[in-house]
Image (cartoon, rainbow, N blue to C red):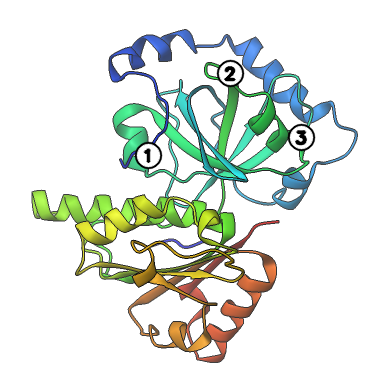
Amino acid sequence: MACAAVMIPGLLRCSVGAIRTEAASLRLTLSTLRHLTLTSIMKSKRKTDHMERTASVVRREIVSAAKVCGAASESPSVKSLRLLVADQDFSFKAGQWVDFFIPGVSVVGGFSICSSPRLLEQERMIELAVKYTNHPPALWVHNTCTLDSEVAVRVGGEFFFDPQPADASRNLVLIAGGVGINPLLSILRHAADLLRERANKRSGYEIGTIKLFYSAKNTSELLFKKNILDLVNEFPEKIACSLHVTKQTTQISAELKPYITGRITEKEIRDHISKETLFYICGPPPMTDFFSKQLENHHVSKEHICFEKWW
C-alpha cells in the first residue's frame, strides 16, 4: 500500500448520453496538444510556483485534453469544476493532483482532484475545487472559465491511497484544513466505493474505519459538507467525521451542530493512534507540520504518516 462516484450537489454537467460524443470532440491532434502544454510551460521565464515546488515529484506521462463540463460555487471563495477527460488511458490514484494547462495562460496550475477514481472509470470525469487567489490559473477558473472551455491535465503526486485487494486492512484518519480537504475527499470517496464493492460483491480490499477531522474558518468554508455527511449516514459504522471552525461569527445550523467543535486538538488525534491506522494530513504548512510532528512524538511510524501542504 502506498502513501504519499459521488456527485457534487448543484453541479452543472453534461448529460451521460453525450459523454461519448463530447469525448470524441476533445481528441486534439498531437501537435495541438504539444503546443498547448509546452507553450504553457515555456512562456514563463522562470519556474512557476506549482512547477517549482513539484519539480522532483513523479508524474504520469499522459497529458490529456479535457473539457469543462460543469461548475459550481462550493463556498464564497471556492469554485468546483467537473472535467470530461478525453484520453482513455488517463488515470489517477485517490489523493493525487493534476498539472492544469490553460491555453493562453503561461503559468501552469496545480489542483488536487477531489473526486473518486471510480467516477473517472464510469463517466470519464474528474472534479477539482479551486480557491480564489491572484495566481493566474485560479483567476482563470474563477473569472474566465466557462462550460466547454478546453484545458489539458497531467496527473502527479506521491500523496495517495491505493490499496490492493490482498493488502492488510487499515483504518484511516484524515486531517484536513481549508482546501486541504480536496485530496482527502478523494480518498474518502474512494474508501466509500471500496465499502460498497465489499458489500455488493463480497470481494476487494477490506478497509477498516475512516475518521475525518476537517477544520475551516467558518461553516461556509467547510466544503462538500453535505456530501461528507451523506457518506457518514450511509456508512455509520465505518465512516465518522468531526467538523471544526476557528472563526465562526454566525449561528451554526441544526444539521451541522452535532458535528461542529472548535479547533482540532492533539488529544482527539492521539485517541485514534493504533498500529493498524494510516494518517493522511493536508492543509496549511503550520497545521501539517504540527500534527505530523505530534504523531511522530507518539511513536507513529513515519510510513503511516502521509502529508501534503497547500500554499
Foreground: 265 or 305? 265
Instruction: Determine which residue is flagged by label 3.
Output: 136
* Distance of label 3 from label 2 (alpha carbons): 16 Å
Left or right: residue 265 versus residue 10 is right
Foreground: 155 or 23? 23
Mark whose residue sits in front, 1 or 2: 1
Left or right: residue 251 versus residue 133 is left
Residue 46, how many percent across, how many down? 88, 39
Any part of residue 159 in sight: no
Three-letter residue code for mark 3: Pro
Tag 3 secondary structure:
helix
Three-letter residue code for mark 1: Pro
Left or right: residue 258 versus residue 250 is left
Circle number at residue 150 = 2
Q: Quadrant of the N terminus?
A: bottom left
Circle number at residue 193 = none
Instruction: Determine which residue is flagged by label 1.
Output: 9
Mark closer to the chain start, 3 or 2: 3
Q: Quadrant of the C terminus?
A: bottom right
Report the number of discs: 3
Residue 171, how many percent across, how many down? 32, 72
Where 160 falls versus 34 (above or below)? Answer: below
